[in-house]
Amino acid sequence: MSIVNLSLDPIGRGVLVVDGVNLSGITSAVSIVSSVGEANKVTVDLGACTLQDIQIQGADLIIKGERIPESVQAALYEFLRNKFDQIDVTVLSDDSRKYAIKRA
């Protein structure tokens, strides 16, 4: 279970902190569902919250950061796992197993 703190001003702008890490700069929306007898569910839409679009063609995407809360990593993994299949691309000359992903 994550510790989620959400502070909003009267027009809906605010600060989102998950497990002590401020995710406000990469969050475009937050929704909360609270049902009797069930754990609260917080859905966070990740995305750049700027007025400019940035487009770079032909780049490798690398995600870095030791400050990503484990609960966010797990939720992101579950989201991506359902969208992609893992393919074994190991060849005989490899020292270890290698995998590639493709859209499911």
Image: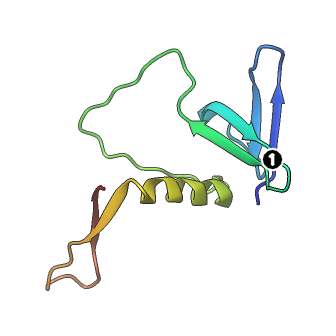
Q: Is residue 27 above or below residue 86?
A: above
Report whether residue 44 is seen.
Answer: yes
Along the viewing direction, whichever of 86 and 73 lies nearer the viewer: 86
Name the residue: 20% across, 82% down.
94
- What residue is shown at x 61% (from left), y 57% (from top)? 66
Question: Residue at label 1?
Answer: 35
Q: Residue at x 14, y 84 (%)?
A: 93
Name the element at disc 1.
loop
Q: Quadrant of the C terminus?
A: bottom left
> In the drawing, does residue 39 fall left or right of residue 93?
right
> As drawn, is 86 to the left or to the right of 2?
left
Q: Quadrant of residue 55?
A: top left
Residue 30 vs 68, above or below: the answer is: above
Kindly tell me whether residue 24 is visible in this rendering: no
State the scheme by which the image is colored.
Answer: rainbow
Identity of the residue drawn at 83% across and 15% down: 10
Crowd rating for badge 1 (residues with CA inside 10 Å; few <14, some 14–19, many 20+): few
Q: From the viewer's side, name the closer residue of 87 and 49.
A: 87
- Counting from the top left corner in percent of width and height, residue 26 is at 59, 35
Residue 43 location (% of width, % of height)? 65, 42
Residue at the outermost front position = 36
Quadrant housing the N terminus: bottom right
Q: Residue 87: horizontal and vertical position, in percent?
A: 26, 69
In the rendered image, residue 67, in percent from the top left (x then y), is placed at: 65, 53
**Identity, as a three-letter code, of the amino acid under mark 1:** Ser
